[in-house]
Image (spheres, rainbow, N blue to C red):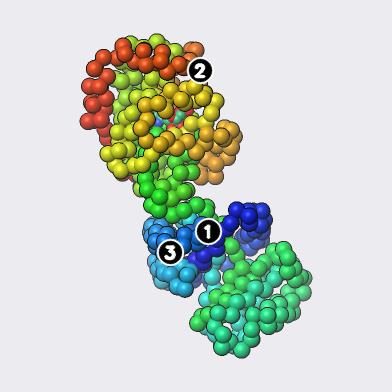
Amino acid sequence: MIYMRANPIGAADFHGFANRICEVLNRYELSERRNCVMYRSFLVKYGEIGVKGKNRYIFENMLMDQVKFALKPVEGSFEVRKEQGRIYVDVTSEDYDYEGCVEALKRVFGVVAFCPLLQVEDEGFDKLAETVVTHLKEAYPAGNFSFKVNARRARKNYPKDSMEINADMGEKILDAFPNATVDVHNPQVMVCIEIRSMINIYWEEIPGPGGMPVGSNGKAMLLLSGGIDSPVAGYMIAKRGVAIDATYFHAPPYTSERAKQKVIDLARIVARFSGPINLHVVNFTDIQMYIYEKCPHEELTIIMRRYMMKLAEHFAKESGCMGLITGESIGQVASQTMQSLYVTNEVCTMPVYRPLIGFDKQEIVDISEKIETYETSILPYEDCCTIYVAKHPVTKPNLEYIRKSETKLTEKIDELMQIAIDTVETIRIEAAE
Ligand code: ATP
Ligand code: MG
């Protein structure tokens, strides 16, 4: 069972929060060799949802849906439920894939952390202490950890109050682990004990991705190429609760089926976090060639990008998206100078979200490694943008000049755009295993 608790984080707590993340990571590493079979439940902690006032239950329900969705492919059966402002996920099958479950939960936006839970009946304090000690021995066989007991007595008829449980349990643990020490400020192991109708015991907090549950913030259209940046951009916007559709422009026969497959594979990795993606594969060849034929070659990339944005916006509007997403970052290449972004953006009527705008390449690479798109992104297949790239593309395009160049494109460009729209291939992308 997995179980979630509201845990709002204010900006002022940021440093405390960062410290807590480090502690959590410490504890997680310390207990890596744990025996997982004992966990029949998890407690999942969530952050910003907790501050949503009377709409909170809507976000909680969305988070529960996302957790259910993430656990679908995991071996075993699970029940997600809410109880007293917390969300529990119960393991209802005899066996289940613990690692798979942990991996799935690590990808659910909205989850700040989750704790594998031991749930036991109340059979008296001595029995409880015995259970705690037995499982601590399994989790930390070396026994040389620092700890703190953190008890909460939600059921007031329990014979000991929280302070007594803290003190008495601490003593039992010290008796059983001669090399363990108490550290009330920065313990390696925080032994949490909650006395409810059942008793919850947990000491491990595994970090989740944070963010907001996908679907809680509408939908946007990602311009997805086969590069490093755009999958990361999609991930980052999805993290804020936004569902994703995607558009990919390819240029057969100049770009291969393998290049298209690479984009599909990237979309499948992003879908692990964002949920299913409708990927629109647009044949851009004729548009690209027509621009190449009519316009100055050094302006080709900028003009092409303006047409990409127009087409992406068409599909975005058609599928109820409220914005476009790109992987652009200021100054990364000629088409991403402030002047180029200004000219590209000028054709858009909906907001364009560029979550990587202030990131250096290495920062983007770091995220792509973390979300596991990097290895796919660096496969060396061609992209439609690179095929006709001019030796010296304009880096400071002037909007009036670009517009003037575009007047050379007759109504044929509208026909070509319509053909691209009519021949779009839409692929439903499900999450990669
Ligand atoms: P990426 O930015 O994904 O690493 P890239 O760096 O090769 O790929 P750029 O030339 O930087 O692509 O393009 C900037 C942005 O334009 C991309 O992040 C992506 O959002 C969009 N884009 C570029 N090429 C394509 C394409 N073929 N199909 C869809 N979107 C594209
Ligand atoms: Mg890029």
**Nearest to the observer: residue 285 or residue 319:** 319
**Residue 395 image point, x, y percent:** 50, 17
Q: Amino acid at mark 2?
A: Thr
Residue in view at x 38 percent, y 52 percent: 215
**Nearest to the observer: residue 401 or residue 307:** 401
Rendering quarter of residue 73: bottom left
SS at circle 2 = loop
**Residue 52 image point, x, y percent:** 47, 59
- Can you identify the residue that label 2 sits on? 395
106 up-or-down from 381: above or below? below
Residue 54, numbered label: 3
- Can you identify the residue that label 1 sits on? 47
Circle 1: is it few (<14), some (14-19), or many (20+) Cα within 10 Å? Answer: some
Circle 3: is it few (<14), some (14-19), or many (20+) Cα within 10 Å? Answer: few
- Tell me: 243 left or right of 421: right
Residue in view at x 55 percent, y 61 percent: 8
Residue 95 visible somewhere in the drawing = no
Circle 2: is it few (<14), some (14-19), or many (20+) Cα within 10 Å? Answer: some
**Residue 234 image point, x, y percent:** 44, 41
Residue in view at x 49 percent, y 66 percent: 4
Give the distance between the C-alpha atoms of the residues marked 2 and 1, in whole angstroms: 42 Å
Q: Amino acid at mark 1?
A: Gly
Give the distance between the C-alpha atoms of the residues marked 3 and 2, in whole angstroms: 50 Å
**Nearest to the observer: residue 249 or residue 161:** 161
SS at circle 1 = loop
SS at circle 3 = helix
Q: Amino acid at mark 3?
A: Lys
Q: Are marks 3 and 1 in contact (CB under 8 Å)?
A: no
Residue in view at x 51 percent, y 66 percent: 5
